[in-house]
Amino acid sequence: MTQGHRPRVSVIVPTRNRRMLLRELLEGLAKQSFEDYEAIVVDDGSTDGSGAEVEAAAAAGRPVRLVRGAGDGAVDARLAGVAAARGEFVAFTDDDCVPHEHWLRAGVAALEAGADVVQGVTRPHGKARPLDRTIMVDRNDGLYNTCNVFYRRSAYDAAGGFQARAGSNLGFRPGWRAKNLGFGEDALLAWRVRRAGRAAFAPDAVVEHHVFPPDLSDALRRAWMTGAFPALVNEIPELRETALTHRYFLGTTRVPLYGAVLLAVVGRRRLAAACLALWITRHIRRMGPVSLRRFAIGVPGELALDGTVAAALVTGSLRARRVVL
């Protein structure tokens, strides 16, 4: 890219201490069939040499720039990346993702066709087993995960960009780890843009998300964060149609658990036990063929996570006065 050239699209990537995963991402960007782009990697306080990885890519002639972040989390890092971006369009992905060859081409094509915000497809980068953590988006669910989303820059600016503290505004009080993840900023921004303009889903704009091995303590923290979802639905009522099942359920695996609790409260203990058994049986079936060790760890872990999500959603529903289960 020549000095002073304004790229068609700026790719924004926040990173922190994921040098090897970041290398895979940069290699994926180097293979893009759409070449009129710049990549802006915001190093949010890494200590593993992630910044040096970006500088090496830039020295090799790749269209990538390094921005030093303040260590305040992914949301602030994205804001810093946008501030440095020069493109007419902005694309967001994460340091634990690998884009397919035509990712940028497909996303930019949707924007050029008139969309102001575009959601792409996200798949696991390899096989995901029970309790593994990854992201799967195969339809326009209205959540607009920033691991794979595109904006027309003018529409992004008109909507005010990401709200740096959206989680707190939703009544969510995260610890420092959750603060670094953010909550709701992506969906809130996308719907402000969508309501003022046009949205599209690009099935050929594909990234693959890393599959992380089980970490139960981290998974439980993330499960408790789900309690902010009812407040998010307060702000984005359209999510009842796009993200929820039958308008009220964030997934259906917990329905037998809710039934068991309600039946126990009214004294129908046998029916409550039957619902509880159904809940456990569904999780066992969902595990599929796995090793005995993975099964012994997985079933209690899956039940603990599902129970935590249920408790978080009930608590969040009472706080927001908006039922999401």
Image (spheres, grey):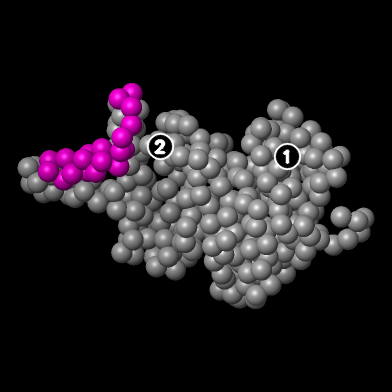
Q: Is residue 275 magenta?
A: yes
Residue 110 inside the magenta-drawn segment: no
Q: Is residue 187 visible?
A: no
Q: Alpha-carbon neighbours of circle 2 within 10 Å: few (<14), some, or many (≥20)?
A: some
Quarter holding the N terminus is: bottom right
Q: Nearer the viewer, mark 2 or mark 1?
A: 2
Rendered position, 32 above or below 47: below
Residue located beneath label 2 in the image = 129
Quadrant for the C terminus, please.
Answer: bottom left
| Mark number, residue 43 | 1
In-image side of 198 versus 8 (left or right): left
Task: Give residue 184's position: percent from left, percent from top.
Answer: 53, 54
- Label 2 to label 1: alpha-carbon separation: 30 Å
The structure residue drawn at horizontal position 44% and vertical position 57%, both measured from the top left corner, is: 231
Residue 145 lies, in percent from the top left, at: 55, 54
Q: Is 52 on the left-hand or right-hand side of 325? A: right
- Magenta part of the protein: which range? 273-293
Of 104 and 244, which appears nearest the observer?
104
The type of residue carrying mark 2 is Arg
Q: Earlier in the sequence, mark 2 or mark 1?
A: 1
Quarter-of-image position of residue 292: top left
Q: Can you say whether 323 is above or below 31 in the image? A: below
Q: Is residue 105 left or right of residue 264?
A: right
